[in-house]
Amino acid sequence: MLFLAKYSLRITFPLLLIMLALLFSLFQLLVYLPQVEEDVRESNQNSYHGILSLVQGSINSNLIAGRWGELSSQLSDLSGVEGVLWAAVVDTNRTVLASTRYQWQQHYLWGMGLDLSETRYLLAEKQKRGIIDTVHSTKWVAYYPLDSFADGQLRSQQTAMLVVGLDISNKLKSAHKNVLIQSMELFSILFALAFFAGLLYRKVVVSRINNIQQMAIAFASGNVSARAEVVGRDEVAHLAQNFNAMANAIQSDRRQLLEAEMRTRSILVNAPDAILTADEKGYLITANPAAVALFMLPDDNLHQITLFSLLSVSEQSVVSSVDVSTRIARLEQLSETVGVRLDRTTFPMEITITEYDTGSLLQYVVIIRDISERKIAQEELNYLTLNDPLTGLPNRSLLLQRLYSAIERCRRTDENIALLFLDLDNFKNINDSLGHDSGDELLVAVSQRLLNQCEGFGVLARLGGDEFGFLLEQGEAVFAPNHFAAQILSLFERPFLVKGYDLFVTPSIGVVHYAGEKIAAQQLLKEADIALYRAKELGRNQYCLYDHALAGMVNNRLEIENQLRYALSRNEFLLHFQPKVDAKTRKIIGAEALIRWNSPERGMVSPVEFVPVLEETGMILEVTQWVITEACRVLKAWHQQGLMVQLAVNLSAMDFRQQDLVDQINTQVSNFGIEPRWLELEVTEGVLLDDLQRTSEMLSAFKREGYKISLDDFGTGYSSLSYLKRFPLDCLKIDRSFVRDIPSDQNDVALVNAILAMASSLGLVVVAEGVEELAQVEFLSEKGCDYFQGYFFSKPLSESDFEVLLRADA
């Protein structure tokens, strides 16, 4: 059937339908004809049986009666039936008793293929209706038994049969003719259907496919807007839809390609990098405007310039080779090289070469970037990497490099070096008060003064912020770094002129000496830092020389800091309570909440060790919140039990730097349903002096809410007594250092008398701390002290033990 594909569907489809109609008609003829023949045979057999059965009885009667004339007449009538060739009555001896053919009478029927035996007779008699045998496909012989009759000649009873020759060929021809006529009619109908189906196919399919074909030809010819206009839901419509989808995709791709080409052209035109193409011999083909401007290329005769001529003479020698591809490969490996313009000026450039093989033509795409600015920036970056941009001094990185080298040299030569860290004291105050510009100007002035002192001895570096480092490698300063540190301190005795102000600033210096020990540079830095930290602890404006004992102190402090960071989350803090006793009644009227740290590693740690660390690291803020919460909880529990006492908590200077401190404490007190008058807030003189205005406003706010305000450790600070009138205080607490030696120390006695008198005149109550002896109790009671607190009455107790004490006191 593949030959049909050579022709148009307008021809092949109708032709195919006609062929199918013909084949179907032939198939129907071949299948139906045998069935018709079988039906004709069966129908005629039944018909002949019916006719012969009817005449069988009358022939019997005439035979028995011996009416031979009538018998012959009956046989003649029988031969007139369509398909009856002859008829005869034959006895068992095959003698023809009567026949439609006179020449057979009284003769024997021999050699005609007839079975006239007695057996045949008995078989026909048994079936009661006779037997029809097929002699030929269209020739039959019928045997019908007849009754016995009296044979006058033999004087005996004889049996006979009616034998009839039949021919159905005419009827079969007629049936064949009818089948053929039906097949022709069927073919005619199928042909007509095929014809109309072909017309319909041409209309529905071929014409629509032609439309798709025409649109495809138009699309291929450049009409990208051509689309097939085919409606429907059949395969042709789907084909049209797929064609349209393909056309849309191609049009979109073409549009994108055009846009990409325009973008590429725009990129090439506007690209800041030089983009060149060269042929396989290295001659230039194209150059974008950036390349033309960078190399000063001519507008014409570009193809006479080689890629290698754009390199400086020194670089051309690197890539020199007879083979162009090898030269290109070497050039590509350079990555960075030196380019040369047509005016012979050179510049550093970055080069990338890509090989482009079209199959018939080998080209190279070359991208060149002028990296002159990058090189300059890199040099500046390299400078900034190793130098401080503000002062111009070496920075920490350069100092470390010099330190590593110096240590290696010392290990080889047994030389000595010294390392000093210097930090300006309270430099933050200058930034906060005068501004960072003034702070920067001060740092420059300090660095210049230090640089003059350090010249000839080693390296001075700014480590960051207000911290400087000295690496002493030469001269007598290496062997006497403490003397050099003292000279540095003397430099700060003179003020620094900054924006018209004479500013005095002091340094703290940490000193470490290295004499070839096997320690790393980082360890040396750590030791200098430890010495600096210790100098600050000792009061600033001094130097400290590192030793191993100092390292132990600092390491212990660092361990405490690290452990404290987890103490709150691990519930390692707890409160102890030391009672305050009325001097007259000796009854407990309140207590001070004192924080304790039960460390898993250290056991119970003294507040003297860990509270300063909390304040330095800022962890005191969270801890204060926890103390307030615990104090409120304990107060509520005691009040619910009828134990009505007042509880004092301590606040630090850092707590007062929180703008919402009053709201925080009010929230806790409100949450537990406690009246503010039962919570006493203790502050030190240092808190009052941190920010007078802010502290005064906060204390006034607490006072308005109903809290009691106490001034703790009174007499140990630097505040003027006039400040007591400025702040809304309720109570003064005499520091234990003044109570310890009374009444034997007359200086302490005089000071305590003055404090008691002053408090009385200001309307303040007084609490004496550290009361441990009866003589102290009697003296303070006599002088008018209001309350006592100390080991004479009770040491600080746990919550449960304090409750027992309260119940006993009640």
Image (tube, grey):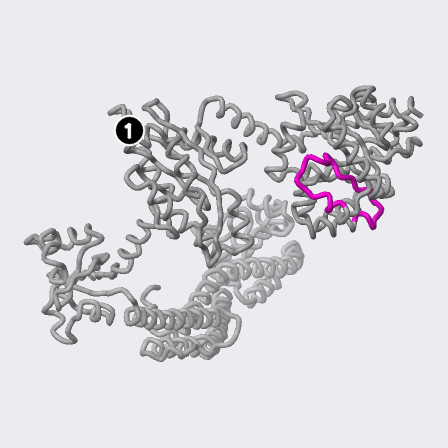
Residue 656, x across and y down, in percent:
69, 46
Total number of numbered discs in the rendering: 1
Give above or below for 783 relative to 502.
above
Q: Residue 11 is drawn in which quadrant?
A: bottom left
Residue 49, x across and y down, in percent:
61, 57
Q: Residue 576 is drawn in which quadrant?
A: top right
- Quadrant the C terminus occupies: top right
For the residue carrying disc 1, how many other residues have a C-alpha within 10 Å: few (<14), some (14-19), or many (20+)? some
Could you say which is closer to the camera, residue 675 or residue 483? 483
- Quadrant the N terminus occupies: bottom left
Magenta stretch: includes residue 709: yes
> For this view, does 177 lie left or right of residue 130?
left
- Magenta residues, start to end: 702-724
Give above or below for 761 relative to 30.
above
Residue 748, x across and y down, in percent:
73, 28
> For this view, does 251 lie left or right of residue 61?
left
Magenta stretch: includes residue 627: no
> For this view, does 695 lie left or right of residue 616?
right
Give above or below for 55 relative to 268.
above
Residue 609, x across and y down, in percent:
63, 27
| Residue 354 shows in the view | no
Q: Residue 620 is drawn in which quadrant?
A: top right
Q: Residue at x 54, y 65 (%)?
A: 79
> For this view, does 499 lie left or right of residue 75?
left
Give above or below for 190 relative to 469.
below
Secondary structure at numbered mark 1: helix
Could you say which is closer to the camera, residue 747 or residue 560? 747
Residue identifier under label 1: 408
Q: What residue type is labelled 1?
A: Glu
| Residue 655 shows in the view | yes
Could you say which is closer to the camera, residue 34 or residue 395? 395
Q: Which residue is drawn at 24% across and 72% down?
A: 289
